Image (spheres, rainbow, N blue to C red):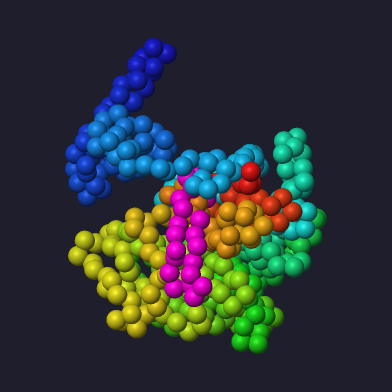
Amino acid sequence: MKKLILTIITIFFIVFFLYISLALIFKTSPKDYFGIGYKTFKNLPIKLQVAIKLFIDQDYLNNLNNDYNVKYIPETQFLDIQFSKIKLDFIEQTKSEYAGLKKTFFVDIYKKKFLITDKKGNIFFLNKNNIFNTKEQPNKIKNNLKPDYILDTFVKDENLYISFVETKNGCETMNVSTAKIDNDYLEFRKILNSKECGITIQGGRIQNINTLDKKGILLTTGANIPDLPSKFAQNNESIFGKILFIDIKSSEVEIFSKGHRNPQGLLVKDNLILSTEHGPKGGDEINNIMLGKNYGWPISSYGESYANDDLKYSKSHTENSFEEPIFSFLPSIGISEIIFLPNSFSSKWQNNFLISSLNGRSLYRIKFNESFTKIFYKEKIFIGQRIRDLKHDEDLNAILLSLEDTGELGLIKSN
């Protein structure tokens, strides 16, 4: 009986890999005859995808020659770095519609601790000065939050802000709650309780801002329907496809900017606001966000549609009275968070910003011009995992990476 089961399993895997190989050889897409094989292949681990392509596709093997002068971590173009990873076994695994099973989490810094929040809303404290002690158990903090899934976390002074999705009576809604940080219990109160129903709500990045003579936060929201253009981003009656200003005291919500597809990163530094945004195929953007401006989605984009070959976007934002992106990535990188990197990190990385990516599994070191209308350069630093969140810790002078393929906290230091 055992031999029969083993034989069946062996035959299954032989047929499975033959099926994938045929799909790759014929270069099929999900619409073609071998579409099922294509989808199955895309859900395999990235290293297995590369191994299969190298084995059966000579063009793919030859393409490795294009990597001339590309450096690999821990070496970058001008700087050797230390890259270490800390396994966070307590992170709960969740399933993503696009990425399969992942250990998604967000990292924040509070005094001498790291505050770790996973996608299900479990919150932990880690002592940053003892972070490499694998025997130390994290302090799990009880709270009254009951999310479907977390979108982002943000610490300001003594307060923790969390954006998340709730579903009631079949209606999926965007929410933001805040709590005073406490080692034992977090009592959250809602400052955004949207009644508008969404579909696979995305975005959710939070940053602190003082504007319009009010103290509040900025919140990014996706355009509601993944991979398909919708009218929400241009509709002032909808919260979706926007960057919102939320007054912390009154919970009043105002539209700060609109015309966004899915802003996955947000940075506020003095009077500068930058966002990173998922575009359609080949249209990821870096945007300079200004009050009252329109960034064009779903009318203008430098990308193309995933779902409809007949759907065309206007490539010029300016001709349609929209704001042009500072930069658009072709191909798309699965853009995520953006941070400013202090000059104290390294004398060779001055006035730099860092952008993380999901499908790109890389960091991008960026230098903007003074007016933030273009970039002078970008350096790709391949990490090998989807990077959901990004922070810089001044005490350790280290870059923190949320590595969601394995649920590891990455630390990068300068040599």
Q: In which quadrant will I find the N terminus?
A: top left
Give how far across and how far down residue 74 sits, in percent: 55, 40
Question: Residue 321 magenta-drawn?
Answer: no
Which quarter shows the C terminus?
Answer: top right
Relative placement, left or right, of 129 versus 303 is: right
> Residue 369 in the image: x percent, y percent?
48, 70
Whether 367 is among the magenta residues is: yes
Drawn side of residue 62 relative to residue 275, left or right: left
Q: Position of residue 295 (x, y in %)?
A: 40, 76
Q: Quadrant of residue 54?
A: top left
Q: Quadrant of residue 80?
A: top right
Q: Which residue occupies 54% across, 73% down?
A: 273
Residue visible at 39% across and 17% down in the picture? 6
**At 62% across and 55% down in the image, what residue appears?**
347
**Residue 192 appearing in the image:** no
Q: Which is nearer the eye, 201 or 267?
A: 267
Q: How many marks?
A: 0
The answer to whether residue 40 is above or below residue 219 is: above
Q: Which residues are magenta?
A: 365-387
Residue that appears at 65% across and 63% down: 154
Depth order, front residue of 44/16 = 44
Residue 256 horizontal side relative to residue 177, left or right: left
Drawn side of residue 191 relative to residue 46, left or right: right
